[in-house]
Amino acid sequence: MTNFKRAERVADLIRSEIADIILKKVRNPRVVNLTITAVEMTDDLRMAKVFFVELGKDTCDPETRKSIEQTKGFLRRELGKRLHLRYVPELTFVLDESFAYGTRIEELLAEIGKKGA
């Protein structure tokens, strides 16, 4: 049997719950277009770093970032209702830069393919 740290299991659960809350309960149109890609938890389960991307974009608008910060309290409250944890973690939202990096690599490979053909 494979052992996983509890923080990893809780992080995966939080990722799916936040995605579900954004999809079903959040009414802010700027936040609805977000995809939650990953969550990293501290070992004491007090802090959660939530990685996100905006659909179809490699960057994040300042208005979207502001909307996320305004929605953070609602998301935390909803997580508290859904999860049975002693402490609901503090949420920190971070733009996932790996999608922009992947897009750049695809562009470079396409450019190499055109030169080689």
Image (cartoon, rainbow, N blue to C red):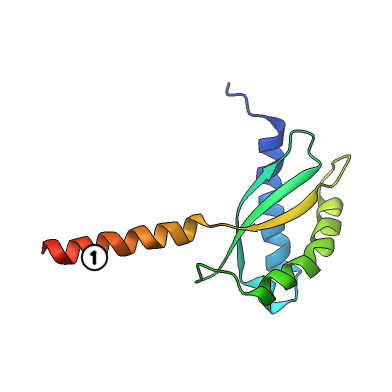
The amino acid at mark 1 is Glu
Q: Residues within 10 Å of mark 1 (few under 14, many from 20)?
A: few
| Residue 91 spot, x, y in % from top left | 77, 53
The residue at the point 21 percent across, 61 percent down is: 112
Q: Quadrant of residue 93?
A: bottom right
Query: Is 80 displayed left or right of 106 in the figure?
Result: right
The residue at the point 68 percent across, 77 percent down is: 63
Single out the residue that lies furthest toward the left: 117
Single out the residue that lies furthest toward the top: 1
Query: Is 75 displayed left or right of 9 in the figure?
Result: right
Under tag 1, what secondary structure?
A: helix
The answer to whether 42 is drawn above or below residue 59 in the figure is: above
The residue at the point 77 percent across, 66 percent down is: 69
| Residue 73 spot, x, y in % from top left | 84, 62
The answer to whether 43 is drawn above or below residue 105 in the figure is: above
The C terminus is located in which quarter? bottom left
| Residue 42 spot, x, y in % from top left | 73, 38
Count of marks, rendered view: 1
Query: Is 63 displayed left or right of 83 in the figure?
Result: left
| Residue 20 spot, x, y in % from top left | 69, 60
Q: Quadrant of residue 95?
A: bottom right
Single out the residue that lies furthest toward the right: 86
Q: Identify which residue, 41 or 97, lies in the foreground.
A: 97
Badge 1 is on which residue?
111
The N terminus is located in which quarter? top right
The answer to whether 107 is drawn above or below residue 3 in the figure is: below
Q: Quadrant of residue 33?
A: bottom right
